[in-house]
Image: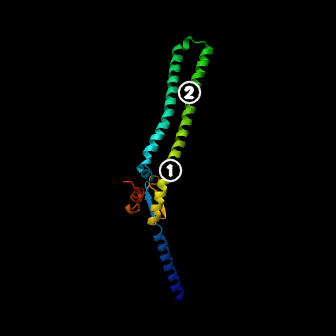
Amino acid sequence: MKKLFKVALVAVGMIFAGNFAHAQTKIGHINFNQLIDLLPETKTVSTQIQAYQKQFIDQLTAMNNEYTTKGQDFQKNQATMTDAVRTVKGNELQDIQKRMNDLQTSAQQQVEQKKNELGKPLFDKATAAVTAVAKAKGYAYVLDSSQVSLLVSPEADDLLPAVKLQLGLK
């Protein structure tokens, strides 16, 4: 009988310890992309990125116009060209197309790098605010609801209103 009592006591103790540990783990969520979009600096960063991107678009447009013009000229005069001239003009068109593809790839990488460079201070500011609010409210974990599909999430655990208040956003 004493062994049964001890086993029951240990089991009850484990249940309470499990519930106590479970009760202390709070999980919150926030739509991090929405928070970044609400920051006033986001508009400035977006404008800078668009201006940077426009430089590449202008270059690609000029190259495309050159390619189109030379391609139309090639099509129009192809019948009267010698084989050597036709080969040179064909290679020139292929070269322009290759340079356009290379520029497009390079431009995408450079624009992405610029986005990361200009966006890092925004990301750091938002992360610091989320961390401060989570710590103040006792949250052990905060999920990014823009990246994770939350099937069930109580309103009380949405940290966006508290983080907006922390950052002075409306």
* Residue type pointed to by label 2: Gln
Q: How is the image coloured?
A: rainbow
Which residue is pictured at 56% across the width and 31% down the height? 101
Q: CA distance from mark 1 to mark 2?
A: 38 Å
Q: Callout 1: helix, strand or loop?
A: helix
Classify 101 as above or below 3. above
- Residue underneath mark 2: 97
* Residue 166 pos. (x, y %): 42, 58
Give amino acid for label 1.
Pro
Instruction: Give me the residue at 53% from left, 88% from top.
Output: 2
Can you say whether 79 is above or below 102 in the image? above
Task: Pick the residue in front: 31 or 161.
Answer: 161
The residue pinned by badge 1 equals 121
For marks 1 and 2, the one nearer the N-term is 2
Mark 1–mark 2 contact, CB under 8 Å?
no
Farthest left residue in view: 170
Q: Nearer the viewer, residue 148 or 44?
A: 44
Q: Is residue 96 above or below residue 144?
A: above
Single out the mark in the foreground, 1 or 2: 1
**Residue at 49% in and 30% down:** 58
Tell me the SS state at disc 2: helix
Residue shown at 49% from the left, 65% from the top: 140
Q: What is the quadrant of the C terminus in the image?
A: bottom left
The local crowd at label 1, few if under 14, some if 14 to 19, many if 20 or more residues have their Cα within 10 Å, is: few
Question: Height in image: 1 above or below 124?
Answer: below
Image position of 56 (left or right of 150): right
